[in-house]
Image (spheres, helix red, strand yellow):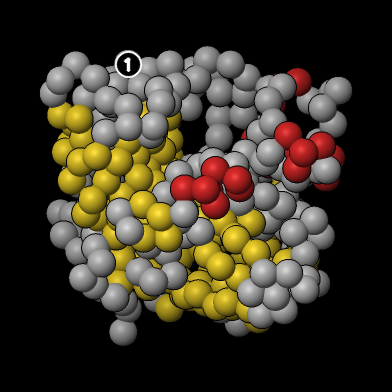
Amino acid sequence: MAPTYRYLGRRAVLIENSELRVTVLEEGGHIAEILDKRSGINPLWTPPWPTIEPSSYDRTKHHVYGSGADARLLAGILGHNVCLDIFGPPSPEEAAAGLPVHGEAPLVRYDIRRSEGELVMQALLPLAQLQFERRLQLYDGAVRIRETVENLSGLDRATGWTQHVTLGSPFLQPGRTCFRASATRSKTFERTFGADDYLQADAVFDWPMAPCRDGGTADLQVFRRAVASSAYTTHLMDPSGDQAFFVAFSPDAQLAVGYVWRRRDFPWLGIWEENCSRSHAPWSGKTVARGMEFGVSPMPEPRRAMIERGRMFDVPTFRWLPAATHVEVEYWVTIHRRETIPEALEWPG
């Protein structure tokens, strides 16, 4: 077990070089910060409420995190978490058995080993019977991340697996922060998404112009300027390329952060918008966040719905994981100081 320190009161482990500091949490495995040392900015989201270790959450005591099925997840969430082996809520039966929203991966405790410029994180997901490993390595202004999921059971399974990357202030600013992505065919959420959803429900469109409820369009390449807004859209990564990406740019900080991955690993990008819309605990109308959630599934939904959906735009909506096998993926995070947003990202090196 690597030596730990405290990050916002949480047990954590870090690695750093002259350009970046990367901090991961022992419980939940969240990548809490990817700090650009020159600007002092961490583009990842820090909730406006204090977080706690998931193992210490008690529904009868911790009312500050709300009363929903996602309360335990919200109690510990920070930055970039992995959703495994579902992306969305559990079924009532799964919830009764102890499965949380987005699966066990963002809640369990990780064994973390640290060496020069590298972290290795491992955790068992006992209900799903999956072994999960994540390796992070620093290369100047980039982080190489490799993940392995091993099916320990004797059963083939339909698996959800999504990188829930959430950006927040001060990097994220309404009307200012810009985005680019290798997105193509897109769709809005199939029903109203939150109290201040401004998009037409269940509408197919081409990135980046999303149809609005009032008949206009919204450019998803700029974080919306509004008193309150909420939305969810899903986007098929360009099937003509081997790689997929998104990049976000803060003109005020002159800082760009991007993720690049193999399209065959994660063919979908979901964009979640929360701009002071959710008034209930723990959100309390104070959260400004944008999730850039790339994964194997287009929509956050229960397992049965994921399987029954099967395909969208003729692309699978889950990852098939045969019995007693493992799958490996790799992606990169890059952070650069610059004056304009890059129109595309390429695989480092």
Q: Residue 76 at what x, y percent from top left?
A: 68, 41
Q: What amino acid type is highlighted by mark number 1?
A: Val
The residue most toward the front is 308
Asked if one can make out residue 58 in the rendered structure from this viewpoint, the answer is: yes
Occupied quadrant, residue 304: top right
Camera-side residue: 75 or 308? 308
Q: Is residue 141 left or right of residue 301?
A: left
Occupied quadrant, residue 65: top right
Camera-side residue: 345 or 44? 345
Which residue corresponds to the image point at 21% horizontal and 35% vertical from the top-left?
A: 210
Q: Mark 1 points at which residue?
A: 227
Q: Residue 119 at what x, y percent from top left?
A: 63, 74
Q: In this view, does 204 lie to the left or right of 100?
A: left
Q: Residue 13 at what x, y percent from top left?
A: 68, 63
Which residue corresponds to the image point at 73% horizontal and 34% vertical from the top-left?
A: 92
The quadrant of the rendering that contains the N terminus is bottom right
Asked if one can make out residue 276 in the rendered structure from this viewpoint, the answer is: no
